[in-house]
């Protein structure tokens, strides 16, 4: 029995306590003894997790109404979840990023993989954007932000409350500055020799996706002198990297006029406007139209949103990935390159690759798989949690 002041919560006899002891960070609601006392705990409460025999396992954050009822915070039952505790976790994460990147533009905290379950922090120079997507972190946001400032020296901290995760935890959707001020205009972010314009106020998620950085770099190596098509481009992820890599021309396709405007600003910032063009529309429709126009490109990249965000949508998602491959492959010139990406953790690599290969085959093309890419090291994978390794990028030569 524990002697700490925290309440206790207990696993059912059939729950997999061994997996939790070996590092799995979540306990689902159907694995817990949910008596009246446990159900009455406030969302975000800290408790001691015990196995069915009442042996202590560690400190967890409890959200009684959530499917993920407990998130492991610390194996030390005497840990104090305060500013110093946050500073220690953020400090470890910062040390690695500071070693890897020569400029302060990266994902600083990648949730469970960096020891802060449900917390995302992206850094943009002296501004950080925090997504506290779990009730325990939202309730301790002051300590988290104070520690963040102490460790990194950032001057502005913004809260991003977008995304469905906060709703699942019963949290508000109010975004805005916590410390300092939000930038008055999009910030230029250098990556792979390109410049991306990040809208930290009205953009998607935290304003920019850092996860594709190594895959942008690989695509840029294929793009010297090439005609490049970037589908689902957002703010010009692959197309601007291709221009930095020497592409003769790049076309960015996206459904968002605001995202394409940011892509155009990035190209202008790079002095590459004459080689860059955009096309607004549904990606499937644009791919079909380009085929009807007999358009050809040396490099085609498709980086769609998550078509399979959960297991229930997996089969439909795989069909969508196959369709993308089938529509994109005819646009690739003989000997050219096709990059296909998935950010769906439910579509694991083998299934995703199978869908892509079927689509390429249905388009009447033969292919070599030349490279498989993942998220950059600022998005570390927690080996025990498959969901933290969501991004796949397959590059084929057709």
Image (spheres, rainbow, N blue to C red):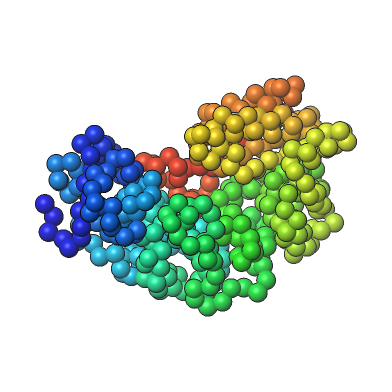
x then y, percent, for residue 267: 76, 59
- The picture places residue 368, in percent across and down from the top left corner, at 65, 27
Residue at x-position 37% and y-position 67%: 140
Nearer to me, 90 or 222: 90
Question: Does residue 108 show up?
Answer: no
Q: In which quarter of the image is the C terminus?
A: top right
Q: Residue furthest right?
A: 293
Q: Looking at the image, is 354 positioned above or below residue 33?
A: above
Q: Is residue 389 left or right of residue 182?
A: left
Give the left or right position of residue 255, taking residue 161 as reference.
right
Question: Which picture quadrant has residue 359?
Answer: top right
Q: Which residue appears at 81% of the width and 58% of the height?
A: 273
Give whichever of 246, 210 is nearer the camera. 210
Quarter-of-image position of residue 134 = bottom left
The residue drawn where x is 60% and y is 65% is 200
Question: Residue 234: x percent and y percent?
Answer: 68, 52
Q: Which of 239 and 363 is in front in this view?
A: 363
Quick one: which residue is furthest to the front in this view? 36
- Any part of residue 339 in sight: yes
Q: Nearer the viewer, residue 151 or 260?
A: 260
Does 357 sit left or right of 384 as displayed? right
Question: Residue at point 16% right, 61% down?
Answer: 4
Total residue callouts: 0
Q: Where is residue 145 in the image (x, y as percent from the top left)?
A: 42, 70
């Amino acid at each position: 029995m524990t002697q700490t002041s925290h309440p206790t919560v207990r696993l059912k006899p059939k729950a997999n306590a061994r997996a939790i002891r070996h590092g799995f960070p979540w306990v689902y609601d159907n694995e817990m003894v949910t008596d009246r006392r446990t159900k009455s705990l406030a969302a975000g409460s800290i408790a001691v997790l015990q196995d069915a025999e009442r042996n202590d396992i560690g400190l967890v954050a409890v959200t009684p109404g959530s499917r993920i009822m407990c998130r492991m915070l610390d194996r030390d039952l005497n840990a104090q979840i305060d500013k110093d505790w946050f500073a220690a976790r953020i400090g470890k994460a910062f040390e690695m990023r500071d070693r890897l990147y020569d400029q302060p533009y990266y994902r600083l905290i990648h949730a469970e993989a960096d020891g802060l379950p449900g917390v995302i922090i992206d850094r943009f120079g002296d501004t950080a954007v925090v997504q506290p997507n779990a009730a325990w972190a939202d309730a301790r946001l002051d300590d988290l932000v104070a520690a963040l400032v102490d460790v990194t020296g950032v001057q502005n901290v913004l809260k991003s409350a977008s995304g469905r995760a906060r709703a699942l935890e019963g949290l508000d959707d109010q975004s805005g500055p916590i410390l300092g001020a939000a930038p008055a205009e999009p910030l230029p972010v250098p990556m792979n020799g390109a410049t991306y314009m990040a809208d930290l106020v009205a953009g998607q998620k935290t304003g920019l996706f850092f996860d594709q950085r190594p895959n942008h770099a690989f695509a840029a190596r294929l793009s010297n002198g090439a005609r490049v098509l970037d589908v689902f481009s957002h703010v010009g992820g692959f197309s601007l990297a291709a221009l930095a890599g020497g592409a003769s021309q790049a076309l960015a396709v996206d459904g968002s006029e605001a995202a394409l405007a940011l892509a155009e600003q990035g190209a202008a910032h790079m002095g590459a406007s004459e080689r860059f063009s955009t096309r607004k529309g549904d990606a499937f429709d644009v791919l079909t139209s380009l085929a009807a126009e007999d358009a050809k490109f040396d490099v085609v990249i498709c980086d769609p949103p998550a078509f399979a965000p959960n297991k229930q949508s997996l089969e439909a998602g795989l069909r969508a990935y196959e369709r993308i491959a089938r529509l994109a492959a005819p646009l690739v010139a003989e000997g050219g390159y096709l990059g296909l990406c998935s950010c769906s953790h439910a579509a694991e690599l083998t299934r995703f690759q199978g869908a892509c290969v079927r689509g390429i085959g249905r388009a009447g093309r033969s292919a070599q798989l030349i490279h498989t890419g993942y998220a950059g090291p600022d998005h570390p994978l927690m080996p025990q949690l498959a969901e933290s390794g969501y991004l796949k990028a397959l590059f084929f030569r057709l």
